[in-house]
Structures are given as C-alpha cells and as structure tokens.
Image (cartoon, rainbow, N blue to C red):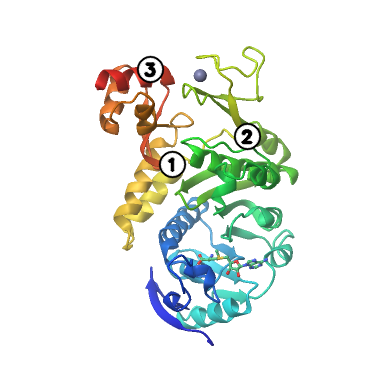
Amino acid sequence: MNFPTETLKEGKIKILVPKLEAFAKKPSDYAPSKAPVFFNPIMELNRDLAGLALQAYQRLVDREISVCEPLAGCGVRGIRFAAEVKGVKKVLINDINANAFKLAKHNVQMNKLEKCVTVKNEDANLLLAHYGAPRRRFDAIDIDPFGSPVPYLDSAIRALRNDGLLALTATDMAPLCGVHPRACVRKYGGKPLRTEYCHEIAIRLLAGCLATTAAKYDISMRVLFSHSTHHYSRIYARTNYGAKKADETIKNMGYILHCFKCFHRENAKKVFHSEHSGKCSECNSKLSFAGPLWLGRISDKHFCELIKEEARHKALKQGGKIRKILALIRDEAEAPITYYVIDKLSERLALPGPSVKTVIEALKDEGFQAYLTHFNPKGIRTDAPSKNVMKILQVIN
Ligand SMILES: C[S@@+](CC[C@H](N)C(=O)[O-])C[C@H]1O[C@@H](n2cnc3c(N)ncnc32)[C@H](O)[C@@H]1O
Ligand SMILES: [Zn+2]
C-alpha cells in the first residue's frame, strides 16, 4: 500500500488497516475518515454483534447462506463473516474506493479466504442491481455506510431473497435525533423529536423508513434486533415477499405524541386525534410529535435469546459488555414504547436523582411494569403515566 498501515487482530482474523495515528494531524481530527481507507476500531462491538446476529439468523433458517457487504472499507466485517460464521457459503465485499478494494483483497488473501470471499470495486447501488433477479439474490446484506443507509435501501431490498436478513447502520444521528429535523424528514420520511428518548425514536424512524420502502416491492419486514449508542443506530430486519404481509407491516406505522411540560407520551395512528386536538390529556399543554415511524417491536425476544446463546460460545474481547447489552435488549424487547430518564424528571422536580433500581422497585410495588433499557443507563420503560413516575420520585426523596 502507498500509505502507512498496520496489522491488527479482530475476532478470528488478521487485518491490514491504515495506521490511524498517521492521519490525525490535530486532536479534533476524526482519524477514520482522514485515512485513505475507512477503518474505525471503535466499531468492533458493532461488528461482533453483526457476526453473532448473522449466526443466529443462519441457525434460524438452517441453510447455507450468501452475504453481501456493499460498503466494506478494508473488508474487516465481511471477512469476519466468512471466518467466524458457520454456514456462510459466499461473501461478496465491495467498496467504491480503489484503495479500499486493494486493501480488502489483500486482507482476503492474508486470511486465506479467496474461495469464500469475492472483492469488487463498484458503486454499491450498481453492484446490488446486478443481484436483483430471483436466484441471484443474497440471504443477508449488511449496509454500513458513512451517515445514512437510505440511498442504498431500495437496491438492497431488491437484492435480498425471500426470508432474508437486512442489517443497517445509520450514523447520521443529528438528523435522526432531531438536531436537523428537516434532513430527517427528507431522508427518512418522518419527523424526529429532541426528547430524552430520541435514540429510540431514531431506531423507529429507520425501521419505519425500511418498512415503507420494502412495502413498495410487496415485501414485509420484522425487526429482529436493534441497538443504539450516541454515535449510531443499527437494525436487523427479516424480510418476506407478499403483498398481504406488506399491508400488515405498514399497520405498524404511527406517531409518538410527547408533552415537554409534563413528560406525558402516547402512541397514535394519526398525528392528533380529535379528542384532544393536539393538547396533552394530562396538563392541556401543546403536544409535540415524532413520525410517521415504526411502532412495532424493535427487537424480538426469541432472536435476542439466539444471539445471546451464540455470544456464550464466543471468545470476544468485549464479551462481557456484549452479554450485558444483549440481556438488557432481550428484557426490554416486549416492554412499553419510550422510556423515562430518571435524572431528567428529578431535575424538573429539583430533587437529587435516585438510583434506577430504587425507582424500578417502587414502580413494581405499585403494580406497574418497569424495565431497564440499553438506550440509557438512567432510563426506565414503564406503563406508569408520567405523573405516577413523578410522584414516586417525590416519595422516594
Ligand atoms: C463506514 S465505511 C465502511 C466500514 C466497514 N463496513 C467496516 O465495518 O469497517 C463506508 C464505506 O463506504 C464506501 N462508499 C461510499 N460510497 C460508496 C458507494 N457509492 N459505493 C460503494 N462504496 C461506497 C466508502 O469508501 C467507505 O469505505
Ligand atoms: Zn402534559
């Protein structure tokens, strides 16, 4: 390579990557995007989970699978799929950047995976279009772009076989979390909202966008798994052909109504239904809204169990952290939509923030459901109305 590189180990593979220190000139520089080929070591956890989810899917469908990673960078993700996931027959990795293509090819050879992994150097949409016909399609596609995956959604859906798995990363958190709401409406077709649970809204906007895009092709989808940090949102969806099922999928679209005054929130099929004409049912203040977005499940409990089972057998650097995240996601999979952030409510009451555990116990004592959430260590999902949560916070203190 004609730029500084180094060899790292990630999962079961060795990988040649750009030497990031050589490309960050100032402390504020984000080295992965300054390098001639994109590589972000921080995303290892994202890639670990991608391999575990792909293995869980492969066990579920119980057949040999083909996988495509059309935006592969140095190839680390796709090569790990080939090396670590049982039942993977073929992996196609691709990047438009000529340096990335060279590096990925080198990495495939270094790991002796030439028989299983093919590397291409094309535009992702052009590549996926070649695989849009029946019997050419992939079992699984992983879209891991800079920013939004939306420009690749149509071609990815068309290149996915019936009962396929589509994994999407979105790193454009400013639009999805409501800092740039107009960009979000343009890209995802739904309005975001700057609330304490904006990261859940981000996942729901992404899932909603996928559901409506798939429906255009008479394809239904179910979200099997999703996770999120402050830097990115990630979803895994299973897609199936059939107009009727696609109609059913679309029924999961709706809105979240939110009151910034009293923290009340509710789901709605229409933005404002007539009973309260845009006013909060609790305090009569103006309601804000997010959507249209996905109101269905954002993780499937059974699929989380399968991923957890895979994680049990893998020696991963961040195994402990991964198992913790998986347990949280499994436990919140069937919990009520949206969560309260305890510190935010306490701040409004000018009270010190109690421990999340204490609040959960108090909610349960009053007969409410209460769950932790992986989205926020101070977050609680509950069916309790906001006024009851506030009351509990006052009593505890
Ligand atoms: C976030 S990086 C991929 C990281 C990689 N998936 C990983 O796990 O390390 C996004 C990649 O998309 C590539 N890219 C951007 N636009 C593209 C396009 N239209 N077609 C194919 N690749 C593209 C970039 O060159 C970059 O390597
Ligand atoms: Zn209110």
Q: Is residue 331 above or below residue 397?
A: below
Q: Which residue is mark 3?
A: 388
Ligand 1 quadrant in view: bottom right
Q: Position of residue 98 (x, y in %)?
A: 63, 79
Cβ atoms under marks 3 and 2 closer than 8 Å: no
Q: Nearer the viewer, mark 1 or mark 2?
A: 2
Seen at 68% across and 72% down, the residue is 122
Q: Secondary structure at mark 3?
A: helix
Q: Tag 1: residue type?
A: His
**Circle 3 residues within 10 Å: few <14, some 14–19, many ≥20:** some
Residue 321 seen in render: yes
Q: Which residue is mark 1?
A: 302
Q: Is residue 200 above or below residue 61?
A: above
Q: Quadrant of residue 292?
A: top right
Q: CA distance from mark 1 to mark 3?
A: 31 Å
Left-right relation of 130 to 342? right
Q: CA distance from mark 3 to mark 2?
A: 26 Å
Q: Nearer the viewer, mark 1 or mark 3?
A: 3
Q: Tag 2: residue type?
A: Gly
Query: Which comes sooner in the sequence, label 1 or label 3?
Result: 1
Instruction: Give 48 or 26, whichever is nearer the viewer.
Output: 26
Instruction: Give 161 or 316, whichever is nearer the viewer.
Output: 316
Q: Tag 3: residue type?
A: Asn
Q: Position of residue 38 (x, y in %)?
A: 53, 70
In the drawing, what numbered circle is on residue 291?
2
Query: Which comes sooner in the sequence, label 1 or label 2?
Result: 2
